[in-house]
Image (cartoon, grey):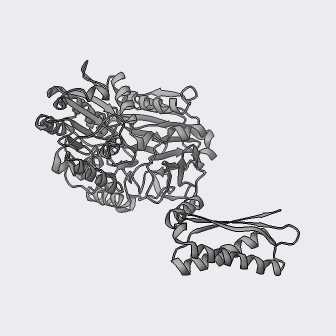
């Protein structure tokens, strides 16, 4: 690979550093760009009405001729969920393993992009020449099959992205992490390592997924009625163990929740899930069977308001009700920020009289993480022995702790780069430094709108949610500026009109006096009239109620 004197290697994140989710990383050398992952994250509490959040790809759009493709590490939402929105703007080839692309294709079908998107299946042995860059892969172990790490060979040296990983010595599907390949890559020399930081706070090793299967079978045997179990839809290994436990305890299985049904269908069609003939039944059939012969596999492990488990807990699900004595298992750890939603769902389940198994996997035994803990992170660092280290995929404290782990295994502190989204690491002649920032941020998806909801709209939504709105409607005479009708004041979310007639009558009088005063001073520009009405009425309402509703004056002339 030819190297020119002025060419530089750039490494940066458009998502996935200092946060959980929305993973997207960029490796660029000269005129060639490889994008690793294209994920989404779910909205934070203050993002009112927002459905999902994806990375801002302005930089990629400005350099679209240089983008050689998007390479995927695995099929979790925080790594593939942004693709339907991104590919509409940036139609480039997508590379991934069979299961990963199978899950992607389901999303592209819904977005009517399947026929327009070039998809290339890779294996851990694949090598992709992408301009001056060569991309190869190595097997990792995670909570979904077909996960890989990525090695990008550049004229400056080798850049390794681990993807999400742990070192499970007894994996459910026999997909062992390829330690030999990792060690070989390390021996060849790694210029920069980008490594998963999710469990950098946890000492020791992450438990094997196989232990969860043993615990689930034990719980299934002890349950006297139905078992309802919620987990991440994309945790295919966990789903297989639920199927195995149901088989061992002679229970039938029904699947509820759109995303769960999609994943089970795709994974079984591709051979990643093995479901015995006759085991799967429809929810309607489950209601007719003896309670101790049924397992219900559901979405809702994060307490999402519209998920199947939450609706069952509130008795609003169309097909399934949870009954006193049913066993409910939440086989997941809440994502930071979701704890209160999970707590509400658990409370509702207890009210019904269900037996609920929830909480940390170390206590319940029904969940283990798919991410490596501190000793595994150190093992990855020792296998790769990178010159430069960039911790990724985790909140800032996790990145910081991962950096400390790297120092503990001998990586120089000045060779460790803690990045914010948009920060670049620039490498030339083997020397790395912080480079110029690239434009990026969050793109908010609300319904069919992509990026049309910004800070101003969110601010308005927040105001509306806090103190409501007052609409003031006035009709003025075009000839002499007198008030022909109104002011009519409409309150929504501010005060209850029937109990606040005195307040609204006084507000009406203040608006009338304000407009009459302005007209007498020959102020007749609509912008000025509205501003004065808004300011005067706002001051009065705050004095009377200590609330600041949004005030929307509507002035018409006839």
**406 or 38, which is in the foreground?**
38
Residue 26 x, y percent position in the rendering: 49, 46
Q: Quadrant of residue 339?
A: bottom left
Q: Quadrant of residue 436?
A: bottom right
- For the point 58% across and 28% down, the residue is 116
**243 or 23, which is in the foreground?**
243
Residue 301 x, y percent position in the rendering: 31, 45
Is residue 485 placed above or below 224 in the rendered structure?
Answer: below
Residue 475 x, y percent position in the rendering: 77, 65
Is residue 386 placed above or below 512 in the rendered structure?
Answer: above
Q: How many numbered tags mark residues here? A: 0
Q: Quadrant of the C terminus?
A: bottom right
- For the point 21% across and 26% down, the residue is 289
Q: Residue furthest right?
A: 479
Residue 353 x, y percent position in the rendering: 20, 47
**523 or 93, which is in the foreground?**
523
Q: Please indicate, yes or no, whether residue 247 appears anywhere in the rendered image.
A: yes
- Residue 426 located left or right of residue 258: right
**282 or 377, which is in the foreground?**
282
Q: Please indicate, yes or no, whether residue 132 appears anywhere in the rendered image.
A: no
Is residue 23 placed above or below 411 in the rendered structure?
Answer: above
Q: Quadrant of residue 77?
A: top left
Q: Residue furthest top?
A: 277
Is residue 433 placed above or below 164 in the rendered structure?
Answer: below
- Residue 409 located left or right of residue 96: left
């Amino acid at each position: 690979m030819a190297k020119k004197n002025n060419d530089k290697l750039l490494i940066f994140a458009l998502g996935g550093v200092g946060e959980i989710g929305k993973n997207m990383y960029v490796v660029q050398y000269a005129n060639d760009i490889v994008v690793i992952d294209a994920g989404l994250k779910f909205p934070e509490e203050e993002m009112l009405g927002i459905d999902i959040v994806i990375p801002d790809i302005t930089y990629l759009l400005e350099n679209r001729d240089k983008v050689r493709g998007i390479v995927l590490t695995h099929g979790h939402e925080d790594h593939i969920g942004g693709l339907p929105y991104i590919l509409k703007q940036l139609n480039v080839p997508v590379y991934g393993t069979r299961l990963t692309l199978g899950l992607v294709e389901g999303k592209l079908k819904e977005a009517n992009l399947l026929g327009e998107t070039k998809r290339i299946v890779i294996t851990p042995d694949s090598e992709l020449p992408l301009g001056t860059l060569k991309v190869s892969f190595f097997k990792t172990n995670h909570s979904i099959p077909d996960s890989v790490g990525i090695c990008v060979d550049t004229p400056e040296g080798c850049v390794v992205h681990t993807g999400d990983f742990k070192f499970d010595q007894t994996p459910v599907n026999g997909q062992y992490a390829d330690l030999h390949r990792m060690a070989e890559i390390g021996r060849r020399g790694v210029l920069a390592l980008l490594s998963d930081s999710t469990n950098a706070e946890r000492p020791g090793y992450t438990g094997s997924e196989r232990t969860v299967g043993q615990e689930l079978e034990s719980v299934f045997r002890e349950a006297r009625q139905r078992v309802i179990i919620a987990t991440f839809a994309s945790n295919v290994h966990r789903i297989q163990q639920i199927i195995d436990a149901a088989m061992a305890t002679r229970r039938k299985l029904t699947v509820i929740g759109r995303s769960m049904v999609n994943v089970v269908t795709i994974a079984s069609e591709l051979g990643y899930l093995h479901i015995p003939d006759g085991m799967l039944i429809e929810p309607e059939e489950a209601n007719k069977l003896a309670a101790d012969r049924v397992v219900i596999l559901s979405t809702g492990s994060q307490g999402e308001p519209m998920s199947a488990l939450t609706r069952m807990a509130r008795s609003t699900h169309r097909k399934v009700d949870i009954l006193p004595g049913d066993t409910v298992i939440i086989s997941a750890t809440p994502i930071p920020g979701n704890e209160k939603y999970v707590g509400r769902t658990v409370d509702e389940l207890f009210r019904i009289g269900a037996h609920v198994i929830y909480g940390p996997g170390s206590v319940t035994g029904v969940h283990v993480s798919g991410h490596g803990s501190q000793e595994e992170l150190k093992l990855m660092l020792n296998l790769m022995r990178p010159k430069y280290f960039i911790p990724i995929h985790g909140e800032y404290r996790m990145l910081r702790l991962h950096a400390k782990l790297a120092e503990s295994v001998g990586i120089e502190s000045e060779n460790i780069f803690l990045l914010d989204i948009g920060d670049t690491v620039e490498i030339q002649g083997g020397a790395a430094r912080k480079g110029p920032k690239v434009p990026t941020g969050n793109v908010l998806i609300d319904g069919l709108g992509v990026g049309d909801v910004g800070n101003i709209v969110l601010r308005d939504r927040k105001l509306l949610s806090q103190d409501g709105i007052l609409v003031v409607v006035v009709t003025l005479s075009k000839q002499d500026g007198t008030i022909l009708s109104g002011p009519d004041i409409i309150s929504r979310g501010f005060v209850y009109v029937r109990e606040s007639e005195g307040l609204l009558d006084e507000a009406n009088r203040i608006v009338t006096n304000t407009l009459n005063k302005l007209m007498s001073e020959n102020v007749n520009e609509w912008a000025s009239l509205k501003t004065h009405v808004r300011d005067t009425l706002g001051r009065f309402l705050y004095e009377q109620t200590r609330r600041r509703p949004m005030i929307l004056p509507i002035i018409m002339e006839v």
